[in-house]
Image (cartoon, helix red, strand yellow):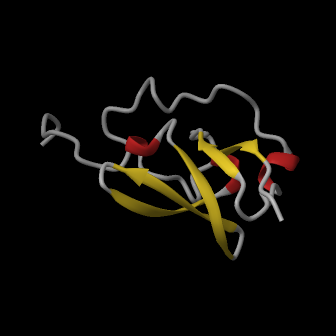
Amino acid sequence: MANRKAKGKRAKTRHKLQSKRKVTVNQLLLKPDLDSTVQIDIEASVHEGMPHPRFQGLTGKVVGYRGKAVEVRIGKGSKAKLLVVHPAHLKVLEVGGK
C-alpha cells in the first residue's frame, strides 16, 4: 500500500508550497478592499482557506467576503472562477476604487 500514487490536494507540491516567510498577525487579519486586485500567493504554513495549487500566482479581483475569507474572481481559460481564500494567501497589488 505504501507505493500507491498520491492524489491529494497537496500532491506534487513539495517545492511549490514551501513556506517562504514568516506569517505575521497583520497578514492573518488583512481584509482587502472590494474591487482590489490581488495575487494568489499560497502560504504553506497556513492550512485554512488554502486554494488549490493550480491557482498559485494567478491574479484576480476581490468581489466579496465569507466570514474571515475573501471571495476572489479570476479568469481561468474562457470561464471565470470564484475562489474562497484566506487573506494569508493573498498579496494586494492594487487598491480598489470607490
- Residue 44 percent coordinates (x, y): 57, 39
Give the answer, above or below, for where 6 lies relative to 68. Answer: above
Give the answer, above or below, for where 26 lies relative to 71. Answer: above
Which residue sits furthest right?
A: 26
Q: Quadrant of the N terminus?
A: top left
| Quadrant in the rendering for residue 41 | top right
Which one is nearer the viewer's eye here, 70 or 43? 70
* Residue in the image at 77% along x and 56% along y: 96
* Residue in the image at 83% along x and 41% along y: 24
Which one is nearer the viewer's eye here, 45 or 80? 80
On screen, residue 76 versus residue 58, left or right, reads left
On screen, residue 6 versus residue 70, left or right, reads left
Which residue sits furthest front?
A: 98
Q: How many marks?
A: 0
| Quadrant in the rendering for residue 66 | bottom right
* Residue in the image at 48% along x and 54% along y: 74
* Residue in the image at 41% along x and 27% along y: 14
| Quadrant in the rendering for residue 98 | bottom right
Which one is nearer the viewer's eye here, 21 or 83? 83
- Residue 56 percent coordinates (x, y): 48, 39
- Residue 8 percent coordinates (x, y): 30, 49
- Residue 77 percent coordinates (x, y): 31, 49
Which one is nearer the viewer's eye here, 78 or 42? 78
Which residue sits furthest bottom?
A: 67
Give the answer, above or below, for where 21 lies relative to 42. Answer: above
